[in-house]
Structure formats: C-alpha cells, structure tokens
Image: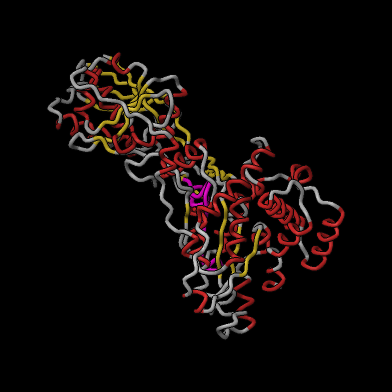
Amino acid sequence: MLASINSMGLSGIQGYAVTVEAYSADGMPMFEIVGLPDAAVKESRERVRAAMASCGLHFPVARLTLNLAPADVRKEGPAYDLPIALAILSSMGVLDANQMNGMAAVGELSLSGSVMGVRGALSMAIAAREQGLSGILLPAQNAEEASCVEGLSVFPVHHLKEVIEHLKGIRPITPLVARAYSDVLRDRKTACDFADVRGQKGAKRALEIAAAGGHNVLMIGPPGSGKTMMARCLPGILPDMTLEEALEVTRIHSAAGTLDACSGLMAERPFRSPHHTVSAVALVGGGSKAKPGEISLAHGGVLFLDELPEYDRAALEALRQPLEDGAVSVVRVSAQAKYPARTMLVAAMNPCPCGNYGSKTQACRCTQREIARYLGRISGPLLDRIDMQLEVSALPVKEITESKLEEPSSVIRARVQEARARQQARYGGEITCNAALTARQLDTYCELDEACKVIIERACDRYNLSMRAVSRVRKVARTIADLAGSEKIERAHLLEALKYRNLEGDYWK
C-alpha cells in the first residue's frame, strides 16, 4: 500500500517542500530509505520503530520503502522522523493519509515517542504557507516561533500518540493563537542601560550617532574605561525591529539552533560577542553543513569584538566583504547557502599591550616596537570599513562614584527612532539606514555645499583619507544632521563626523 505525507526541509534559512512516501509490500522484511538521506535520516528507522512500540503499535513485517522527494536534494537531520512514522502508519492502514491533506508534519522522535524540537521551524512554516498548505504539525517547543505565520494553523505536538489521536478525531489538538507583535515588543527586556554608565558623555554621543545611522564603531581606550559596558548597552538604544526584521532574525537563529526552546519571535536586537579565539568559519559561517556564522547571527543587531587585536588575522579579514555587502555566501562541497549579515560592527581594543599608552593616569610599560606590532595586527582595509573611531579615556574615581543621574537608554532610543524615521521617509524603503547608502545614493542624499567640500579636501590632505573613508564620513555627517533635524549637511555636522576619523593618524601613523 502506498501513502504520502507532506513535510518540510531546510536549506540555509530557506524552507522547501518534501514529500515522504511509504510503500509497503509483501516480501522479505526490509526497511529502506531513499532520496539522498544523510546518516541522521537513515537512523530514523530505529527511532521510528521504538517510538511506535512505545505507542503500542507493531512495526510492519513487510518490504518497506521510504522515499523523500525531491530525490535530488540531500535531506539532513532528524526532522523527518514524525512524517516518516505517519507515512508508515498510513501505509499500514492505521491512519487515513487523507487526514493529512493540506497539512505538513515536522519533528524528531525519541525512543519513547516524544516529539522533540528541530532547527528552522519558522522557515519551514513559512515555506508551508507558500506551498498553499493550511496547517503544520510541529514540536511543542518550536510551535511558538512559528505561530506568527499568518494564514497557517500551527498544531503543537508533544508525543506521537497525541498526533495519532488528533488525526483519528479522538482528541483534536488546538492550534496556537499568535500573539500580537506589539505585545511581543512590550515584553522584551534590555540587559544593560546607559543610565548605569557614569560619565563618558562623548562616547555616549558617538554611540547614539552610530545607532541612529547603523555605523560601525571602534573604541580605543585603557582597561576599565567602560568600552565593553557601553557596547552591551548599545542594543537598548537601537530602534525597534519591524515584524519583517523580527521574522528574518528569528529565522536565522532558528536555523542555527540558537533559539531558546518555547520562545517566540525575537523582539530584542541580537548582541553577539564571540571570544577572540573564534575561527574564520565560526565568524562568517561554514562548516560541513554551511551553518550561519556570528556575523549572520548578529544580523539586525550588534557584533561586538572585544580585544580586537587578539583575534586571528584571517578571521578579521574574512569580515571585510560581509561588512561591505551586508550578506555572506557560504559554499561547501556538500552544501551552500547565502545568509544576511547586515550588522553593526562594534570593536574595542587597548592602545597597547599593557593598555596604558596615552593614559593620563597610568604610565605605559611598552616599547614603541611593541606598540607598533600590537596595532599592526589590525589591517588598513579593515580600519577603512569602520565608520567611527572613538577614543575612550579612563575617568577619575570622583566622577565614577558621584551619584548624579545619567540619561537612560529609553530617552536615547527615542531620539534614535526619530532619526531612523527621517531616514526611512527619505529613502522610501530602498534602504533602512544611512550606513547602507550606495555610491550613487551618496551623491543624491549626502550632497555637500562649497564650504563643506573645502573642509573635506583639507581633511583628506591632513589625515590621508581614502575614498571609502570620505564616503563613510559623509554618511556619518548625514546621520548627525538627521539627529539635529536638518535636511542638509551643515559645516558643524561634517566637522563632528571628521572628529571620529582622526585616530588612525594618532595611533597607526
């Protein structure tokens, strides 16, 4: 007897339709899975056999063939356990396959029959809706993230027996009701607040500009000056994610398997802080299954690299193209994928190995050769892709301990949201922020008057700015103008933007 069940697969962060066909015939007992299954899919035969036994069902003593169509696409992972079990039960006559018309099933089975979570549930649910399906059976711990897909009924399942009873009409499963995205935004929690950062008004101002325009930032300063703390506060002042952004960010984390169990959409912008021993593959993505890297997991949020010179040179150089393109293509022998990587790069470093070079409170113990070798670990092309270079000085103890109130993140975020709203109205949906301006758009939206052109020319002569650096100065100046509510870039805006490009001359030259 032939039976087929709809299921879903995952390629990168994109879901695709998979049909699980089961054919049971008389003959020597055999269980064969075809359709380019990997080792995890082939092992499903033992998981399905034990899960059916746990539900009091006998595995068929017959010649059983399972086909996963399309047969020319490699199937990976244990997400096909549940549809395989349902296809076998339908071929045995225990279930009516017609009960699954218009529905898909995804889930891993334990030996006891429990349905366990899978990666990429949100992408699979979106693909199911695009295929015209009306519902999907998902593990309970993945159902919440997929419940936001409009036009698709998401049925949370805990056990294989529960699915069987649902399809037989004995005990129907109630589909989840999606939460309004406004409620999700209201319930988010911010880990760090700028109200807890004492002093550092100049650094806070620079980070506000960076958040308003989506600019990359490098902070240089001695240990304990607050660089890491301010970087962790940055997601709290970034503008709220739209529903489309939240869906994309959640899809990436779901595909990577980093989404918390039973969590819904991600409303808080991601903050990723990989250790300096991270490899190039872990940073930009790859591996045997072409998984997303840290720069993609930080999409829509902040990628924070603390102690920047300590990172592997090859890993840092691998960031150059994704930072420019906003996406990364991962190609391997057995898999390939393209992941979004539009993120804010925020880096922090000491000015020298001991950390006190240029400090007003501590004496530096390093030689000039040691300092030059330390700073030389950061390449010029990577520095060129950082919009703002910020010097963070150590504060006197009195300024840290005094109890005056600091401006909270909520107030700063309100100004950032206003600046982003001006940008979105100006660009009409072409891009989301000033940092994403192309060369052609730069001439249209960042036009300089004659006085500003003279300033730029003098800055190029003094600081030896490259054409890319000049473009990034103009983008930062456009953001400063947006924060000030100005439609045109004025002299003061350009001078402030240039202030954030002079550290190369102080440290690297």
- How many badges with numbers are in the image? 0
User: What x and y, as percent, mark residue 217?
Assistant: 60, 59
User: What x and y, as percent, mark residue 346?
Assistant: 56, 59
**Residue in view at x 34 percent, y 24 percent:** 20
Residue 305 appears in the rendering: no
Magenta extent: 292-310
356 inside magenta stretch: no
Above or below, 149 against 231 in this view is above
User: What x and y, as percent, mark residue 473?
Assistant: 72, 56
| Nearer to me, 438 or 99 | 438
**Quarter of the figure with the N terminus:** top left
**Res 101 → quadrant:** top left
**Quarter of the figure with the C terminus:** bottom right
| Nearer to me, 136 or 315 | 136
Above or below, 222 against 81 in this view is below
Above or below, 139 against 284 in this view is above
**Residue in view at x 62 percent, y 54 percent:** 215
294 inside magenta stretch: yes
**Residue in view at x 71 percent, y 61 percent:** 496
Figure colour scheme: secondary structure
**Res 357 → quadrant:** bottom right
